[in-house]
Image: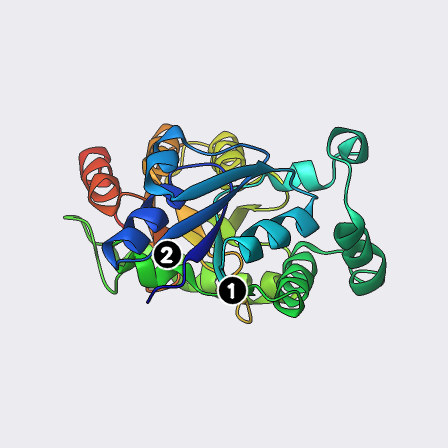
Amino acid sequence: MDEPIGLIAGGGRLPVLVAEGMRAQGRRVVCVSLAGNHDPALEPLCDRLRKVGIMRVGSWVRYLRRQGASQAVMVGYVRKSAMYDPCRWLRNIPDIRAIRIWFSRLRHDKRTNAMLVALAADLDEAGVRLIDGSQFFPQHMASPGPMTERSPDDAQLQEIRHAWHYHQVYSELDISQAIAISGQRILAVEAIEGTDALIRRAGTLREGRSWTLLKAPKPNQDLRLDLPVIGTATIENLKEAGATCLAIEAGKVIMVDKPLIIQAANEAGIAI
């Protein structure tokens, strides 16, 4: 395929893995780096790269279309707390397209998922269709069954069942992608602070008991927009916080550098 593919890149290593997968499939990569917050390793993988503001949506579209890209993958982290920063307007002045999304499409619902869906719809109208990026790195997606040397024991499997039930309930309220549980007690639910902060908080509340973390997308989540991600830092944080099991949904959670994650979990005695 001669048409280049767009990459709307936030921070972290995931955009690098996506770009590597795109290049491996023979695609030319045109990248929009949100606020220039990208890994330096991304630049040599892109045929074109431009830094733009997080709230300059019109600039994303114009650049991608000028470069001939009508499809794009949006990956990488943008801290959710930054979206609600009261100084965001001063730090990153929105353009007309971003203002229209905020006051028109999001007039009655400004939850995170609604923001992402509205953004995808607006990009599509402008001629840039967001697609699921997991097709470019299938080797880094969670797979069924135990992935580590150690399998969950009966008590941990019961924790996973309880956590899954609560996850379905909380997800309907657009609250959580991750839940920390010990026995039948919910220690913590992920909110705006993100998974790493949730893990640290659960570690302070566990009262010496081991615990399990469940992470999965919301039931009706658009997988083009916000797939859950774990990395080696997740395992390090779990070990430090006293967790002994990590449950993630097969095919729907990204494991950034999957072999390294599994190795780290084996060394830490954590079942995945």
**Residue at (32, 58) in percent of width and height:** 136
Image position of 12 with respect to 123: above or below: above
According to the image, label 2 marks what residue? 248
Depth check: 231 or 195 in front? 231
Quadrant showing the N terminus: bottom left
Q: Determine which quarter of the picture holds residue 61.
A: bottom right
In the image, which is nearer the foreground, mark 1 or mark 2? Answer: 1
Q: Would residue 179 be seen by someone viewing this image from the given angle? A: yes
Q: Secondary structure at mark 2?
A: strand
Q: Secondary structure at mark 1?
A: loop
At label 2, the amino acid type is Ile
Image position of 247 with respect to 13: above or below: below
Depth check: 266 or 58 in front? 58
Dot label at residue 70: 1
Position of residue 116 measured from the top left corner of the image (x, y, whole percent):
63, 58
Q: Residues within 10 Å of mark 2 (few under 14, many from 20)?
A: many
Position of residue 196 measured from the top left corner of the image (x, y, whole percent):
48, 36
Q: Is residue 269 left or right of residue 10?
A: left
